[in-house]
Image: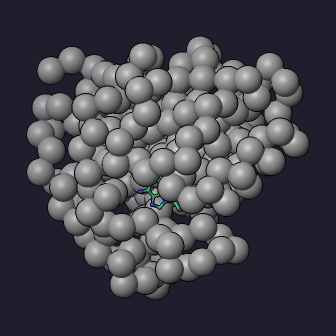
């Protein structure tokens, strides 16, 4: 039996990825960072994983992590791009995308001033909502503990509230007894509408 720790928004996000993804599916990690989440996706027997980060150092760190921990056949399915998620690469439009993940904030261990910016995240989410296949899931890890992160979470929740309930299911996990704790926003495109 899999033990799920509700203590961690990241662990909860990974739990949902495993539920929604099926072998052969394609997924996008829109914020690779040091590649920990990308690596989790790489181990799930998917058809392909597209990883994006606007920082070259993040793509290099992710590449190293993937090379060190994936089998050759798994690594071949990983497609990394040093680019902003405000535009998805053309490869993303060639496949049905079942999962798109965002882990907002700054690159751990790097310049904390290079963070996700609310306006870019909102632009990206608009594209992701169109791109994701019916039944597919978008997960967003938010960090309201810093000023831009709080603004980003608020505007994302506002945007989520505006989405039609006939088209999208929205769920927001937060930890109310932890001050300014990270949270997990889930958006699933309904199968038919
Ligand atoms: C919290 S880190 C991601 C952590 C990563 N998931 C991991 O497991 O290591 C956030 C990343 O988002 C990237 N980022 C910020 N804005 C971006 C954008 N517009 N497009 C793509 N990546 C972006 C940052 O460079 C940073 O590496």
Viewer can see residue 104: yes
Q: Examine the image and state in which quarter residue 193 appears.
A: top left
At a point 31% along the width and 66% down the height, the residue shown is 118
- Which quadrant of the figure has residue 112? bottom right
Q: Nearer the viewer, residue 59 or 23?
A: 59
Task: Place residue 93 in its image quadrant.
Answer: top left
Residue 33 drawn at (x, y percent) = 61, 57
Above/below status of 72 relative to 82:
above
Q: Is residue 91 above or below residue 34?
A: above
Q: How many marks?
A: 0
Work out whether residue 169 can be spotted: no
User: Would residue 69 appear left or right of 105 to someone viewing this image?
Assistant: right
How was this image coloured? one colour
From the viewer's perspective, is residue 55 above or below residue 146? above
* 138 with respect to 155 (left or right): right
Residue drawn at x 86%, y 27% is 71
Which residue lies at the image location 17% right of the left edge and 31% below the top edge?
167
Closer to the camera, 81 or 170? 81
Residue 188 position in % (x across, y down) = 33, 36
Check the image and report above or below for 143 versus 100. Answer: below
| 31 left or right, relative to 70 | left
Q: Position of residue 95 (x, y in %)?
A: 44, 17
Q: Nearer the viewer, residue 116 or 160?
A: 116
- Residue at image point 31% right, 58% down: 120
- The quadrant of the picture occupied by the N terminus is top right
- Say which of 4 and 105 sits in front: 105
Residue 183 percent coordinates (x, y): 44, 65
């Amino acid at each position: 039996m899999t033990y799920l720790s509700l203590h961690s928004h990241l662990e909860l996000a990974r739990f949902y990825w495993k539920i929604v993804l099926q072998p052969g599916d394609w997924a996008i990690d829109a914020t690779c960072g040091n590649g920990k989440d990308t690596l989790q996706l790489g181990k799930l027997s998917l058809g392909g994983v597209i990883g994006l980060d606007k920082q070259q150092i993040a793509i290099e760190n992710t590449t190293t992590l993937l090379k060190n921990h994936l089998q050759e056949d798994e690594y071949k399915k990983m497609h990394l791009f040093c680019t902003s998620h405000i535009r998805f690469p053309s490869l993303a439009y060639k496949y049905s995308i079942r999962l798109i993940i965002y882990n907002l904030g700054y690159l751990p261990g790097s310049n904390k001033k290079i963070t996700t910016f609310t306006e870019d995240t909102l632009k990206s989410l608009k594209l992701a909502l169109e791109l994701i296949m019916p039944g597919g899931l978008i997960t967003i890890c938010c960090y309201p503990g810093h000023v831009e992160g709080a603004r980003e979470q608020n505007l994302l929740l506002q945007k989520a509230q505006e989405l039609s309930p006939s088209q999208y299911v929205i769920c927001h996990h937060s930890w109310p007894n932890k001050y300014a704790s990270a949270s997990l926003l889930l958006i699933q495109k309904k199968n038919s509408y």
